[in-house]
Amino acid sequence: MTGPGGADRTPRPTALVTGANKGLGKEVSRQLAARGMSVLLTARDEERGRAAAAELAAEGGDIRFARLDVTEEKSVRSVAELVGESFGRLDVLVNNAGVSGVVRGERRSLHEMSVETLRSTLETNVVGAFALTQALLPALRTAGGRVVNVTSALATFARTTGRGPALPADLIPYCASKAALNMTSVLLADQLREWGVTVCAVSPGYVATDMNNFTGPKTVQEGARTIVRFATLAPDELPDRAFITEEGAAPW
Ligand SMILES: NC(=O)c1ccc[n+]([C@@H]2O[C@H](COP(=O)([O-])OP(=O)(O)OC[C@H]3O[C@@H](n4cnc5c(N)ncnc54)[C@H](OP(=O)(O)O)[C@@H]3O)[C@@H](O)[C@H]2O)c1
């Protein structure tokens, strides 16, 4: 991206995607760029993020890279400054970065789980998304933008009605963090409505990515399509205060 002074204020609509070096974030970046947006692909690992951005840029999209760890205050601040200087506004923010809090290949019982895992999962999945959204409010307000928080159907209270199979104990951090993200989305939507900024929580479905050791039945293309659809829907078509799946609004 260009430096200070706003020399590169793109005429295209603009988007920022977090955790976009792989998985859903990378594919969402690809699909948003294919719709003609200038996309700031961000990742906490500089090398892997740059490689992903270069790969997508080679396909012809306007994709730029910036390093962003959503749990680092300084990193959040500097990306918000970069967006202000280079884009001047932000049409779409996709808070996609997330961790599962689960140790790959090991199921932990309630007694074995570390409290630190709950803390760090909330820090990334909730605090990180909130801090970034807050830092980007001026740019979102200028654009009358959209915030999409990527959430999970595992975290809906609707699944607590009836007596389905219990989830494993080590999913408590993940589900608790996404439930908190859901409520954050509703309250932010209420706060930002008067600025013309719309907020939604979108669940992509169970998608084959690194997060679940590629066990999900859906492809990243399918999962990303749901996120992109609601990231780009006209504000008056967006279900208000809704938990959104590929079918549209669903019970919280
Ligand atoms: N896959 C599914 O079935 C599914 C279902 C519902 C919701 N989701 C949600 O979809 C989102 C994307 O997940 P995914 O399935 O694509 O998994 P993934 O391939 O593991 O991607 C997660 C991304 O988040 C990044 N990340 C983690 N902590 C970060 C931090 N502190 N700062 C910045 N980036 C960070 C990861 O970076 P590193 O590569 O550096 O670790 C990675 O790029 C997550 O929010 C997830 O909860 C996924």
Image: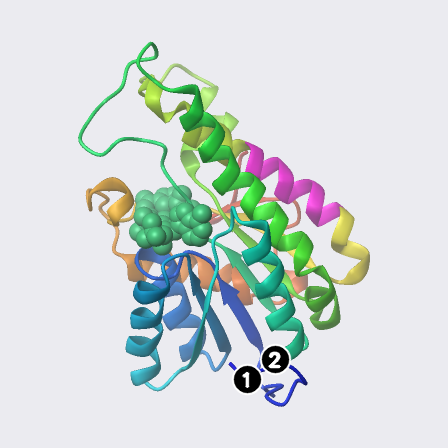
Question: Which residue sits furthest front?
Answer: 74
Q: Which residue is mark 1?
A: 2
Work out which quarter of the rendered image holds the C terminus and state it: top right
Q: Is residue 183 above or below residue 110?
A: below
- Report the span colored magenta: 180-190
Q: Amino acid at mark 2?
A: Ser
Q: Residues within 10 Å of mark 2 (few under 14, many from 20)?
A: some
- Tell me, yes or no, whether the highlighted magenta stretch contains residue 69: no
The label shown at residue 86 is: 2
Tell me if I can see residue 36 in this picture.
yes
Q: Amino acid at mark 1?
A: Thr
Q: Secondary structure at mark 1?
A: loop
Using the numbered discs, state the Cα–Cα distance from disc 2 to disc 1 in whole angstroms: 6 Å
Q: Is residue 222 above or below residue 1?
A: above
Whether the residues at callouts 2 and 1 have beta carbons within 8 Å, the answer is: yes
Q: Nearer the viewer, residue 236 or 186?
A: 186
- Residue at left offset 56%, top offset 75%: 14
- Residue at left offset 35%, top offset 57%: 24
